[in-house]
Image: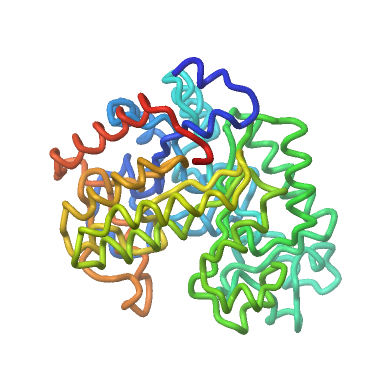
Amino acid sequence: MLTLWCMGGVDWFKHAIIYHILIDRFAGFTSTKAWDTPEFLGGNLQGIIDALPYLKDLGVNTLWISPFYKTSAYHGYHITDFYDCDPRFGSKDDLKQLISSVHDHHMHIIADFVPNHCSRHHPHFQQAQQDKSSPYNDWFFFTHWPRNYLCFLSVRDLPKLNLLNQETQDHIIKAALYWLSYGLDGFRLDHVIGPPHKFWQHFRQQVKHQYPNAVLIGEAWMQGIRHHELNTINLRWKHLKWLLGSSSESLFKEYRHELDGVLDFRVQEILRDNIARHTNGKHVERVFEKLRSRYHAYEPGYYLPTFLDNHDMDRFLFECKGNIDKLKQAVTLQFLLPQPPIIYYGTEIGMSQQRSLWTMKTHGDLQARQPMQWHHQNKELLDFYKKLIKERKNRDISFPP
């Protein structure tokens, strides 16, 4: 493990086994009664510190934490200050302690970073709405001041940032550098299809100049995007990509020279459709070969981290209708692939949900964001995960195959 820790550049990420944490719902809360409302439960950075023995015992070596910045929403993606920690998650000292503790365990830690938009409660946006001559007016895309503006897709709570404005760009990139100075090992970059490529080129240049070992992994996904929302994103041939589907290979390849990789939504779709939703388990070998063959289209060193579920989709066990054996099949294939695997918190202990988030009019995502079940765990499944993780660490990972 120490050898991997000392690797130069982002080679360390090749051996990453990642645990994805939604801070407010993972550890540190005192009550779970309001889990199905979009309110803060009380999960915090100290809770993650306290859970490090559990994570170390599980065997993961990289943590991915949700946004910890000052926010107007429990999940952290509605940012009101890019340079401060939200006190409900903890202080800057708590963040330093978490990063230090993770490193003491010879593990890495990356965090969500959200450059495309901010909360409508951000003081810069509020000033821009109140004063047409405000210097912050050009930080956003007002189509008809002050009420109409571009946002994250159609979410009016999230005004889109004008990242071609030099001051806005500097503000966001300096925020990323500021948090990397705390010792973070990189970022999962939210909604990378929103900002223009010129921004990502400059972002990479600035980050890699100061922090060459910091990994940059993008979320390139078009699930649920409607045609009229294409004006809020910046992709080459975006109308064609939109027609091809939410996780086309061309979408992933678009960031090959700007990021270190993108999350592999295609693997998730294949495993969901061919295992979770399939009645016949005899075709698993064909599924695996289908997954492996895709990597020949990518150059070495461009990472496609795999996952079964996350905070924006139904949990995989729910898709399996509670069938643990199907979940085991899927995670076995995931861990055999030559890409860093991601475990969404609770999947390793059999967490599921009551309803599909896609069938609910509002706040359906809460179904997939239920609080970590610290006292009701499938121990047999947990041991299965520990075994797979141990086997992966002892296996040579060919990349690409």
Name which residue lies at 73% across and 43% down. Answer: 204
> Is residue 48 rendered to the left or right of residue 116?
left
Q: How far across and down, in percent of the image, does residue 321 sit?
A: 18, 64
Picture quadrant of residue 154: bottom right
Q: From the viewer's perspective, is residue 24 above or below residue 379?
A: below
The mark total stands at 0
Q: How far across and down, in percent of the image, does residue 266 sit?
A: 46, 60
Q: In terms of depth relative to the viewer, which is nearer, 1 or 207?
A: 1
Q: In terms of depth relative to the viewer, which is nearer, 111 or 344?
A: 344
> Is residue 272 rendered to the left or right of residue 215?
left
Q: How far across and down, in percent of the image, does residue 30 sit?
A: 26, 44
Judge whether residue 51 can be spotted in this image.
Answer: no
Q: How far across and down, in percent of the image, does residue 382 sit?
A: 20, 38
Q: From the viewer's perspective, is residue 287 above or below residue 364?
A: above
Farthest-out residue, top: 2
Judge whether residue 8 can be spotted in this image.
Answer: yes
Q: Quadrant of the N terminus?
A: top left
